[in-house]
Image (cartoon, helix red, strand yellow):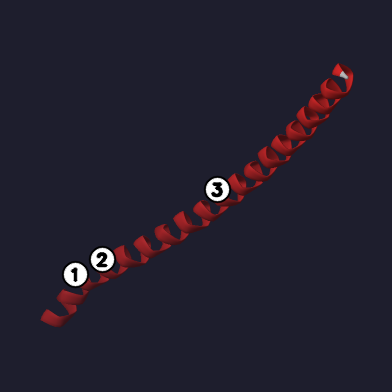
Amino acid sequence: MEHEKLVKNILAPMTAAIVAMIGWSMIQVIELKEEIATVKTDVKYISKQVDLMQEKLALKYEMEIYASK
């Protein structure tokens, strides 16, 4: 009888709490992966924009040098 009370009053809620924490942790990991993917996409976009700006500045600089001759 005592064993059943122990299982019912302590082990069952403890097990449920552990399962809930593991589930919550898994959800957090999935959300973190999604956020990392978003950041990677943003970084790629920003890098492309920086490359385009560098190209435009290089062309402008070359045009200024050519025009000054």
Say which element carries label 1. helix
- Give the residue number, with chain letter if any, for mark 2: 13
Secondary-structure class at tag 3:
helix
Residue that mark 3 sits on: 35
Q: Which residue is mark 1?
A: 10
* Quadrant of res 52: top right
- Neighbour tally class for label 1: few under 14, some 14-19, many 20 plus, Cα within 10 Å: few
Q: How many marks?
A: 3
N-terminal of the two: label 1 or label 3?
1
Check if mark 1's residue and mark 3's residue have beta carbons within 8 Å: no
Mark pair 2, 1: CA separation: 6 Å
Q: Would residue 19 be seen by someone viewing this image from the given angle?
A: yes
The one of 63 and 38 positioned closer to us in this rendering: 63
Q: Nearer the viewer, mark 3 or mark 2?
A: 3
Quadrant (top left/top right/bottom left/bottom right) for the C terminus: top right
The reply to whether callout 2 and callout 1 are in contact (CB within 8 Å) is yes
Q: Are marks 3 and 2 in contact (CB under 8 Å)?
A: no
Tag 2: amino acid: Pro
Residue depicted at x 18% and y 68%? 9
Above or below, 33 relative to 3: above
